[in-house]
Amino acid sequence: MTLLRSAVAVVVLCALFASASTPVTANPDLTARNDGVIFALGADANYVTGCFPAPPLGCAGPVILYPVFLGGFESTPAGRDPEGFDVFLIDHVLFIAGGGTQFFPIVGDGIYRRRVGKNPAQEMILDLSIAGGPVNVFDSGLVDLDPSLNAIDISIDMNDQINYDTVMRIAANPVQAAIHGVTATKK
């Protein structure tokens, strides 16, 4: 991890922990029925804008993959829906994207649903503001889930990756912060 990536990750995690209204404990079990779990974006997360799909099927224009996409969010269990999905409220979303000398914040909230067992599937819907702009809905649609993973790995977008769109791969893991030898977990 580069020094810049490390510094931004520390700032984002501190902001997430500071925004929590309850004491902090880690619980990496996504299906646990307790308070929120802090997730941090991993190295496989990415932020892309541009024309989808590539010409001749889509619009003519570049696709830009930003070299920096960091951040995290809090996931809190909210029960089970009638379709058998475990539902999680996603709060305190704070991502940083950009490159070179230009970085911009992405903030918001939403929901994440996952179903294990028969027909494992997942879905994420986030209401996000990019660089202080208007709130837009980013939706993954219902996609396959690898139930053996205790992580979130899903792509969200605004326009189903048709014509000009912004796509974010949310590859995130539960985290436990250790600062100065003290382990912080959310209770």
Image: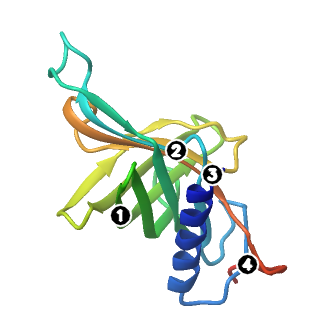
Task: Please name the residue shown 33% across and 47% down the image.
Answer: 139
Label 1 Cα neighbours within 10 Å, binned few <14 / some 14-19 / many ≥20? some
Q: Residue at x 62, y 78 (%)?
A: 35
Q: Amino acid at mark 2?
A: Ala
Task: Looking at the image, tell me whether mark 3 or mark 4 is earlier in sequence order.
Answer: 3
Which of pointers 1 and 3 indicates the residue nearer the eye? 3
Tag 2–tag 3 contact (CB < 8 Å): no
N-terminal of the two: label 4 or label 2?
A: 2
Disc 3 to disc 4: CB gap under 8 Å = no
Q: Amino acid at mark 4?
A: Thr
Q: Which residue is mark 4?
A: 185
Q: Which residue has dot 2 on it?
A: 45
Q: Secondary structure at mark 4?
A: loop
- Image quarter (top left, top right, bottom left or bottom right) of the C terminus: bottom right
Looking at marks 2 and 3 on the same chain, the residue that comes earlier in the sequence is marked by 3
SS at badge 3: loop
Above or below — where is 46 with respect to 34? Answer: above
Disc ID at residue 2? 3
Q: Position of residue 99 (x, y in %)?
A: 40, 48
What amino acid is labelled 3 in the image? Thr
